[in-house]
Image (cartoon, rainbow, N blue to C red):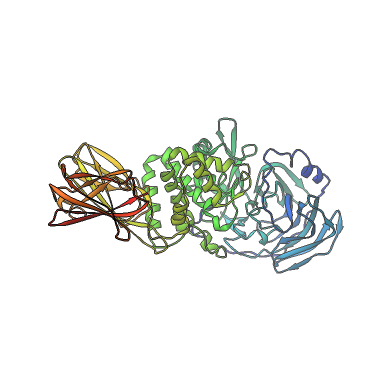
Amino acid sequence: MRILPLLLFAFLIAAAQGQVGFDPNTLQEIVAGEAHRGHPFAKADGDPTRGYDLKYHHLDLSIDPSVRAITGTVTHWFTAIDDLNDVVLDLSGALVVSAVTHHGNTIPFTHVGNILTVPLPNALIDGELDSLSITYGGVPPDTGFGSFMQADHGGAPIVWTLSEPYGAQDWWPCKQDLNDKADSLDMWVTTNSGQRVASNGVLVAEEVLPNDLVRFRWRHRYPINYYLVALAVTNYAVYSDFVPLENTTVEVLNYVYPESLADAQTGTAYSIPQMQLFSTLFGEYPFALEKYGHAQFEWGGGIEHQTMTFMGGFSYELVAHELAHQWFGDMVTCGSWEDIWLNEGFATYLSGLCYENLDPVWWMPFKRGRRDYIISQPGGSVKCVDTTSVGRIFDGRLSYAKGGYVLHMLRWVCGDSAFFDGVRNYLHDPDLRYASALTPQLVAHLEQTSAVDLTGFMDDWYVGEGYPIYTAQWAQDGNGLVQVMLEQSTSHPSVPFYEMPVPILFKNGSLDTTVVLDHTFSGQTFSFALPFQADSALFDPEIHIVSGQNLVLKVPVMAFGHVGVSLYPNPVGNTATLFLGNEMSGAVRVRIMDAAGRITSEKGTVLGDQRTELDCLTLAPGSYTAEISDGQSVLRVRFVKP
């Protein structure tokens, strides 16, 4: 979902309309037959709650777009987990249930607050299939981002739904469980002639009814989460775009306001190269057997309803963001609102990948804008720590911008091939595909493809708050040897230090090279040779890392670090080179001391070209200080043995 400022609406509230019945003669076949349980995209086994596993939804609703009200019957098919005595559903107390039927018989129920409880006439055993139908109606409440809204556009009325994260219960009896997707859905909506209904899946029928009514029948045969079930009703104009993919061509079905047709036709066409790009990077569009689509509605952003995104406009980035959700959020859904970044971080980042691959002139502005937004405040965790707050779940700076940039930094740390391979494996993991996922499952796939332990990275960037602030001092001698001292502070105390590969670009008027420094502690020094004399250095010019208020200083060789002393490589291997510039020559004494100040080795040596080799083979892992004395002065440098 992309959040932009909401419009102000005048709400028209009136009495609920008469309901339309549903003949369930074919439901058993739908649920048990090849069209459903044998569907090649049947969901992976999840961890559903409340003692039952949803299989199928049928919504048969009546809506007048000029009235903020709903009536209808919703039928759920489900299987028991262990023994099941009661079916518990979520439904707003503002809606009135007139009947619950089981095998054609009316049965008792209780509806207290937002909980609808239906005791079953007979307990079900583990795996047993059953169904219930709930007939209800009323005026839905106004919660979240507007879970059921009525407004007007161009003089015409419109009703739409937007259920994320907790609003589905405001307009239909459902089970608000991120880990229990129904395998399939039928949505029947009866409305006034002249109106059209947008919903999930494929439109299989438009039935003309008496009394100037029409019924739209939508069919969806992919697993779907409760908040992605949606409808919108108004006088839509309809047209299609088509996306050629490697194995098929996908229809993009567009329901737009007649007064917006020309602008919409320009904007929805963006989805063609974007879908082709995402299919190349992450696997074919996940609902290719049905469609993708856009339905315009009176909101400032967009919401990624499965196979039919609702759009407040058709800007390039909004079209990309909502399309990306069909992979990240719809096919694989976050298994907890704590992990909302798996939806919104990916959608944000994929809109950036469209710039990188399709319109590169905007790639750097995209990264710079997100980086600047993230560092506009010193704290904030990508992990959503308060899932009771809708505002915190959909925090644009944290769940979207920083979540997206964490993915970019994971790409930097893991490497391009390992990152994209890991993400593809995550999406196509049979336990996650068309199901739900948590952050550790993404991390496990990235660790497997990259062979990088990401524990510390995720502790810092996903759980921790803030960002690093760097100071880099550098010098280069006449022989081309460059010395860099890299210091780091952090914007928030939750992270004392970010261990990151840090890129610095060294250049002159005609030559440049980027050196990546493995930064493991503040004050770490690095030495390396360049084949040219650099006149300037740029810190992370491609913005691989979220950081801010950085400072790069060129200093004289004599003034570098602690009077010019350095040691490389750092961390050390079995040996290291100690470099003293012009500070000392001739005979010196070198001591190596551990973190407690104990001398671990000591030797006398004669410097050659201001350098001497240190034997580090026998050092235990830890932090050390090399102390060098010529009898008149003492120099010290810190280093690490991994």
Q: Could you tell me which residue is drawn at 42 percent across and 41 percent down?
A: 415
Percent across and percent down for residue 361 are 36, 41
Give the quarter of the image for residue 145. bottom right
* Count of residue discs: 0
Residue most toward the top? Answer: 247
Q: Nearer the viewer, residue 230 or 382?
A: 382
Percent across and percent down for residue 110 are 78, 67
Q: Nearer the viewer, residue 563 or 350?
A: 563
Q: Is residue 275 left or right of residue 432?
A: left
Asked if residue 417 shows in the view, the reply is yes
Q: Is residue 616 left or right of residue 64?
A: left
Q: Nearer the viewer, residue 197 or 120?
A: 120
Residue most toward the right? Answer: 105
Q: Nearer the viewer, residue 100 or 259?
A: 100
Q: Could you tell me which residue is drawn at 72 percent across and 65 percent down?
A: 115
Q: Could you tell me which residue is drawn at 68 percent across and 47 percent down?
A: 45
Percent across and percent down for residue 467 are 38, 57
**Up/down of 140 relative to 431, above or below:** below
Percent across and percent down for residue 146 are 59, 61
Residue most toward the bottom? Answer: 112
Q: Is residue 390 left or right of residue 83?
A: left
**Up/down of 94 relative to 353, above or below:** below
Asked if residue 553 shows in the view, the reply is no
